[in-house]
Image (cartoon, helix red, strand yellow):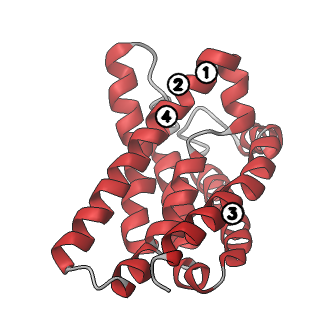
Amino acid sequence: MLENVLVGRKVTTKNKITAKILTSVGLIALAVILPQIVHLALGQPGGVQLLPMYLPVLIGGCLLGSKWAIVVGALSPVVSFTITSMIGEAMPALPRLPFMVAELAVFAVVSGLFSKKIYENGLWAFPAVILAQLAGRAVFLGLVAIFQSVVPFTVPMIWSQILTGWVGLAIQAVLVPLLIIGLRAILVKGND
């Protein structure tokens, strides 16, 4: 969506790249900060239920498209792990990190595939987010099924966590599209 907005405004290539970099960095920062806020307010169970790191990644996909959003999705858990491991308990935990990198990269790519459609009609953000959530969680679960003999969690354990996180997924399935529709209205207005 952002690409279409910038093209419509005849922004130079250099400025388009700058805008995408700044947006990506802001979303990665939000993906690091938001879980910390949720954990401070609601503890670890709040994080498991609300899945706060997913929110900026899904926004990134809808806004940036797959090529840029995959960076947001893949780097968000890595940056979070790096920062939080230096100041205390790593989030996500090291054994979960590669699975979350894959999951959030899928979130970003799938939601990003809808970016041009969202520019045309903001309602496309709803299927973008829902399909991204389904695909990302399926990848996480599938990878655990493949590697469960060498990781400290099993398919039933992760399935239980997926069921616990349905609240966060449901909230995000509504909240992210509404945020994207609002952003679209603001951004596209300048292209009319």
Relative placement, left or right, of 33 versus 140 is left
- Circle 1: is it few (<14), some (14-19), or many (20+) Cα within 10 Å? some
Total numbered badges shown on the rendered structure: 4
Amino acid at pointer 2: Gln
Residue underneath mark 4: 95
Q: In this rendered view, identify the residue nearer to me: 192 or 41.
A: 192
- Circle 4: is it few (<14), some (14-19), or many (20+) Cα within 10 Å? few
Separation of disc 1 and disc 3 at Cα? Answer: 24 Å
Q: Are marks 2 and 1 in contact (CB under 8 Å)?
A: yes
Mark 1 or mark 3, whichever is nearer to me: 3
- Numbered label attached to residue 39: 1
Callout 3: SS: helix
Q: Is residue 192 above or below residue 152?
A: below
Callout 1: SS: helix
- Circle 3: is it few (<14), some (14-19), or many (20+) Cα within 10 Å? many
Callout 2: SS: helix
Separation of disc 2 and disc 4 at Cα? Answer: 19 Å
Callout 4: SS: loop
Relative placement, left or right, of 134 versus 59 is right
- Residue found at x 59% / y 42%: 149
Amino acid at pointer 3: Pro
Q: Sequence-wise, which precedes: disc 3 or disc 4?
A: 4
- Numbered label attached to residue 36: 2
Residue underneath mark 3: 177
Separation of disc 4 and disc 1 at Cα? Answer: 19 Å
Separation of disc 3 and disc 4 at Cα? Answer: 31 Å
Q: In this rendered view, identify the residue nearer to me: 184 or 98.
A: 184
Separation of disc 2 and disc 1 at Cα? Answer: 5 Å
